[in-house]
Amino acid sequence: MLRLARTWLWLSVFAATLTVYTSAQNTTAHAFLWSSTAGIQDLGSLGGSSYANGINSTGQVVGYYATFEGTYHAFLWTASGGMQDLGTLGGDFAIASGINSVGQVVGGASTASGEVHAFLWTAASGMKDLGTLGGTFSDGVAINDSGNVAGSASSVGNIRVVAFRQTAGKKMYGLGTLGYRYSYGYAINAAGTVVGASPLNKNLTPNHAFIRRKGSPMVDLGLGGDDSTALGISQSEQVVGWSSFSGASPQAFLWTATSGTQALPTLGGQNSAAEAINGKSQIVGFSDVSQTVTHAVLWTAPNQIQDLGTLGGNYAVAQSINDLGQVVGWSTLQ
């Protein structure tokens, strides 16, 4: 099944419909940083396994690690200071998902009452609770350089979980759905355009990738296939993610309003997904090599794929890329 690193925990807790991690989560993994000059670098951990989810223009990295107590904590990594624990909202776990150019970090964390709320962390103020749409759950997944946050949150009674946009200093704004009461926001660009996925009916399948521009309704990208998810968006509205084209296995795609959808090449295996895209149209994600081997990859053009390898194990995912071409993600060690 397709693995989405940013949301596996929240989706399992709240019975969402996108897929979760497979057996790779049961082996030791470490966050990595890759560059064309240095190759793949192990970022270590403050405990057990670690997973990098985002990188900004200055090379600051965020993600989460497994604590020795059996839970997860968010981290910030810098070249000068290494890995730093960002704490929680009073509970026992937190996951950092995104970071912007000024070092603002977003993610989701447990509160003292056991709820899960989106947070905004800064070096000056620490972790701040961003609230919900009235329910007990929210998760901040992405943040742009203006401080606008995208993610998902539940309504009163947790009847609905919908994608949200939150303008800096203001309340969350629900972005609607494609037909049923769920949607999930995964990325936001400088214009505040959010992309993600939403089920079309009460059976919670199929899920379709969407784009939601400011002042406009949510639009189905119409990629074809049974299921699709948009995971990244550039400033010029290039959208990437995965789609099960014509009922096939999930495959990475690039979408633009002018050119439509293009399936991205693979390393020869069955599954692939594009997780993020930078301002230079460089795309990162993963591709199966075989049934038991999956590697992090970089697409430097729609028809060019580069194998970024692993940290020694059989499984790696590239999660984010900045405009310098630095890539972060995570890999099993053996």
Image (cartoon, rainbow, N blue to C red):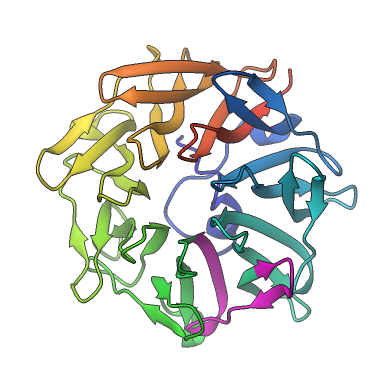
Q: Is residue 162 visible?
A: no
Q: Nearer the viewer, residue 139 or 13?
A: 139
Q: Is residue 209 above or below residue 323?
A: below
Can you give x and y, in whole percent of width and height, for residue 333 in the image?
73, 22
Number of callouts: 0
Q: Is residue 32 above or below residue 82?
A: above
Can you give x and y, in whole percent of width and height, for residue 73 in the image?
77, 56
Q: Is residue 325 visible?
A: yes
Residue in the image at 66% along x and 31% along y = 32
Q: As drawn, is 69 to the left or to the right of 112?
A: right
Q: Is residue 135 magenta?
A: yes
Q: Nearer the viewer, residue 58 or 273?
A: 58
Residue in the image at 64% along x and 21% along y = 40
Q: Quadrant of the C terminus?
A: top right
Q: As drawn, is 104 to the left or to the right of 239?
A: right
Q: Nearer the viewer, residue 156 or 300?
A: 300
Start-end of magenta stretch: 121-142
Q: Is residue 61 above or below residue 94?
A: above
Residue in the image at 45% along x and 32% along y = 285
Q: Is residue 26 above or below residue 88?
A: above
Q: Main secondary structure of the magenta part?
A: strand
Can you give x and y, in whole percent of width and height, for residue 68 in the image?
90, 47
Q: Nearer the viewer, residue 281 or 264?
A: 281
Quadrant location of residue 223? Answer: top left
Can you give x and y, in whole percent of width and height, for residue 274 in the image?
39, 35
Q: Is residue 31 magenta?
A: no
Quadrant location of residue 299? Answer: top left
Q: As drawn, is 265 to the left or to the right of 81?
A: left
Determine the residue located farthest toward the right in the rendered image: 68
Residue in the image at 40% along x and 72% along y = 164
